[in-house]
Amino acid sequence: MTKLATFDDDAALVEIKHQAKRQWNVQPSDFANLCSNPIRKIVDNIKKPATSTKTLIPLSLGDPTVFGNLHCPDVLVQAIVRNTRSMQHNGYIHSAGSEAARAAIAQHFGNMRAPLTMDDIIIASGCSGAIEIALRGLLNPGDNILLPKPGFPLYQALCEAHKIECRFYNLKPENNWEVDLEHMQSLVDDNTKAILVNNPSNPCGSVYSKPHLEAILALAELNKIPIIADEIYGDMVFGSNVFFPMAALTKTVPVVAVGGLAKQFLIPGWRVGWVMVHDRNSILKDVRTAYFKLSQNILGANSLVQVRSSRQRWAVFFF
C-alpha cells in the first residue's frame, strides 16, 4: 500500500506556502474560442422596436415547428411513445446508426446511377452533425474548402473551429443564384480538398437545374476534388422545380451527401441526420473508414427514432 505523504516538517510547509503563491489562470481552449456561428451574433440580438405593436416574425429560423402551426405526423409520435414505453431502446446503439435505419436510408436514396449500401451510411446527431463529420473526415487544419456565398453560416463556423480555410465562391442572384463557375475555378489550388454545394439552397431557395449541376461536377472532375452535397431540402421542392441528387449525375466524382429527417418530417429536435458516401471508384475508401471512426465520438444518434423491427418497416415508416 502506498503511504500518503505528510507535512509535519516546518521546512516542507514553508515550501508549500511558497508554491501556493501561484494564481489561478484557467482559460477556455483555443478550439472553443474558435467556435462562433456568425448568424447567431446577429439573430440573437434582434429586438422588436419598443414602439411597435406588431408581432415579430423571425425569418432567420430554420425550425418549421417554432410557431406551433406545423406538426409532425401523429404516426411518428405514436411510434416514439411505443419505443419509449417498451423500455428496450434506452441504451446505446451502433455508433454509426442502427443497421435497419442505415439499410433503409441506403435503399431509399440509392439507385442504379448512385448505388448505396448500409456500409455507405453514417447516422449523425442531426444534419448539422452530419456536416461536421463530412468536413472532418476530408479536411485537415490548413486545407481549404470552397463554400457558397451566401450560404448556411454553420459551414463557416465548423470550418473555422477546425482551422480549415474557407474560400467563398459567388452565387449569381440574377441567374437563380447559380454558381459563378469562373469564380469557383479561380479559388482552387493544391490545398483545396472539397467543394460544398447546397442544393436546394439555404438561404436562397434556389433549385439547380441538371445542366448546372453537371457543370459543377465537370469542374470537380477537372480538378479531382470531391463534392460535399448538402441536400437536406431535397424532398421539399415546389412548382415546376425538380431536384437532382448530385451523386446520380456522375460516375467519376465522389460525392459525400448529407441529409436528415428534420425539415421534411418537422422534427428538428429529434436529431437524426446522415452521411451518404457515393464512391463508385473507391476514391474515398479510407475516408469512409474515417467517417465511421468519427461517429464513435458521439456514441450514436437518437436511438428511439432509429429503432424499428426490420429494414422494411423502417423504410415504410419514414420513406
Image (tube, grey):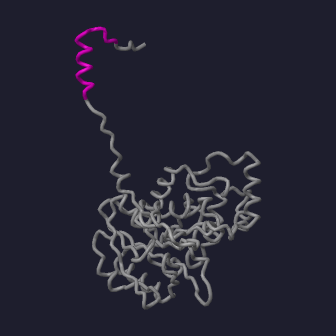
Q: Quadrant of the N terminus?
A: top left
Indicate the quadrant where residue 290 lies. Answer: bottom left
Q: Is residue 12 magenta?
A: yes
Quadrant position of residue 283: bottom left
Range drawn in magenta: 6-21
- Determine whether, in the image, residue 261 is placed left or right of residue 166: right
Name the residue located 50 percent from the left edge and 72 percent from the top edge: 230
Q: Main secondary structure of the magenta part?
A: helix
Give the total number of marks visible in the rendering: 0
User: How far from the left and from the top, in percent, is residue 307?
Assistant: 69, 55
Give the x, y percent position of residue 286.
Answer: 43, 60
Q: Is residue 122 left or right of residue 196?
A: right
Measured from the top left, where is residue 100 in percent x and y? 67, 59
Q: Residue at x 25, y 9 (%)?
A: 10
* Residue 121 located within the stretch drawn in magenta: no
Camera-nearest residue between 154 and 125: 154
The answer to whether 111 is drawn above or below residue 176 in the figure is above
